[in-house]
Image: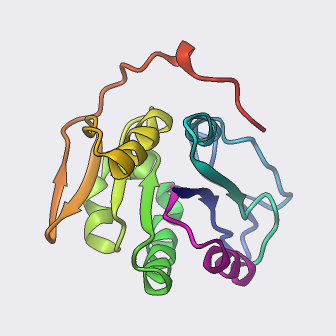
Amino acid sequence: MKIALSYPPLESTKGVPLLSQNRQFQWFCEPTYIYPMVPAYAATLLKVHGYDVIWDDGIAEKKTYKKWINDFEKNNLDLVAIETKTPVVKQHWKIINEIKEISYDTKVVLMGDHVTALPRESMENCQVDYILTGGDYDFLLLNLVEHLDSGKELEPGIWYRENGTIKDTGAFKLNHDLNALPFIDR
């Protein structure tokens, strides 16, 4: 299974968006990039478990949106996971809908603060396939991929669609052993 953890570029006159490792979203006039630890752990967990992982930080790589979407098309992904925040969630909805137009079979996952608080909103406003709620979305993304790959039971905290109906696995639990995480593969 080929998976991308991606930060699509969000072009704006306001500056560069800081999405990761920041409790309060900010636009920076002078680009500032903080390494996104939880998604990096997710990528490492997936790699350690034998999955083909692409780290696609279009923001830090200063990609244009056109370049990012062209790369998406070329990569022929099975799944793409995107972290979002409230000020940019509507932009991400548009991007997700475009992804689904290009490759309907690619599974799209949203994770982050906004979708943890309001998962149904994103399920109703875009074609996202899965939403991971809670702060342990590194572990939840691995669980979801293992579910898709081999039928492993989904853990609490995952929203999804089944036959056109929005469903969820219950409230997320923060009960994962953080000491079990591998060192991040940078």
Task: Say which residue appears at 45% left-offset and 33% top-offset.
Answer: 139
Magenta segment range? 65-84
**Left or right: 158, with 184 as reference point:** left
Question: Residue 136's quadrant in the figure?
Answer: top left
Task: Say which residue appears at 75% left-offset and 42% top-offset.
Answer: 34
Name the colour scheme. Answer: rainbow
Compared with 181, 122 (above or below) is below
**Left or right: 130, with 93 as reference point:** left
Task: Tell me if residue 172 can be seen.
Answer: yes
Q: Is residue 83 magenta?
A: yes
Q: Position of residue 75 (x, y in %)?
A: 64, 71
**Left or right: 7, with 16 as reference point:** left
Q: Is residue 38 magenta?
A: no
Question: Residue 137's quadrant in the figure?
Answer: top left
Compared with 3, 155 (above or below) is above
**Left or right: 56, with 101 as reference point:** right
Q: Position of residue 133 (x, y in %)?
A: 36, 43
Task: Tell me if residue 18 can be seen.
Answer: no
Q: Position of residue 125 (x, y in %)?
A: 31, 73
Task: Say which residue appears at 28% left-offset and 35% top-offset.
Answer: 155
Report the label total.
0
Please identify the residue farthest to the right as the structure is shown.
30
